[in-house]
Amino acid sequence: MTNATYKHTRLEKLGTKDISEIDAEYDLRDFKVLDGHEKEVGRVIELLYDVQSKKLRYLVIELHSDNTDENLRQILAPIGTVEEHKDENYLFIPALNSDLINALPDYEAGHVNPGVENMVRLAYAGEDLLADGAGLTGNTVLDDNEEDFYSHLHFDLNKLFGKKKEEEPPLYINTICGIFDDGLEAENAINDLIKEGFSQDVIELSSSNQADDNIGLDESINGGGSVICVKIKNTEEAFKVSELMNINGSVSIYESQE
């Protein structure tokens, strides 16, 4: 056994810290835990996170017992093994069963060293995963290459919290279009729009002839000039776009519903 087994852990309890300080969408403590048969086996009493990456790594689960006189066992569940349940008061761990519970080491606060983490990994991996090597990342003991160890699905936050929401595209409610007789004025208007924070993605420049079919340009102003159309999200942006177009010599401004 290497000395890496005994090195100090990077894991800490969340304790009195706010959940917003780590990579987790909500606090899982006090959730009840269901095993693979949807039998209640315990509750979450603490969360362990990586002090460097701020990522949530384990739930500490206190197991139920019919014997009220004995100290209740506490075990670890890697965050990637945990799923939401249809009942919002529960968490579901499909891999959890009596054999797995018996195979897991007891959790001791402050003593989750790499050797303990490796024992937990092996227990959750199961015979099928170990048979084809998918249960391990090549590290029999967690060592300095921690990123490889934690890249395993056992530590995937997406399973529980859902895939991180990509930033949703903004909702554009309207398009403000301006007609320019002078191409240089149109170019200046675009430059000013960009300086005011409007992305090039929301600005479209075309000739009035090109714009005719696409945006319903009124025939009375259809000529050889330039048309700038800007997608806007609110009335404040609408006023700002109109103002910049006016300043730069727009001969006509109109609004079209997206």
Image (cartoon, grey):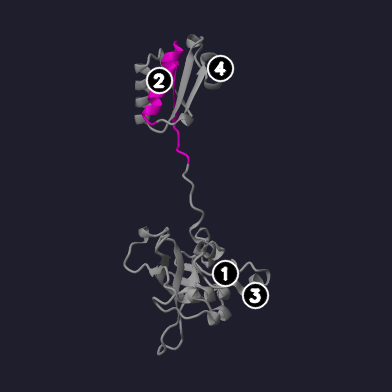
* Kind of residue at disc 2: Ala
What label sits on residue 176 in the rendered view?
none
Region of the chain picked out in magenta, as a range: 169-197
Distance Cα–Cα, label 3 vs label 1: 17 Å
**Secondary structure found at label 4:** helix
**Depicted 174 relative to depicted 56: above or below:** above
**Secondary structure found at label 1:** loop
What label sits on residue 139 in the rendered view?
1
How many neighbours does mark 2 have within 10 angstroms: few (below 14), some (14-19), or many (20 or more)?
many
Residue shown at the point (68%, 72%) measured from the top left:
131
- Given this view, does label 1 or label 2 mark the residue nearer the observer? 1
How many neighbours does mark 4 have within 10 angstroms: few (below 14), some (14-19), or many (20 or more)?
some
Distance Cα–Cα, label 4 vs label 2: 19 Å
* Kind of residue at disc 1: Asn
For marks 2 and 3 on the same chain, the one whose residue lies earlier in the sequence: 3
Residue at which label 4 appears:
210
Residue at which label 2 appears:
189
Distance Cα–Cα, label 1 vs label 4: 62 Å
What label sits on residue 127 in the rendered view?
3
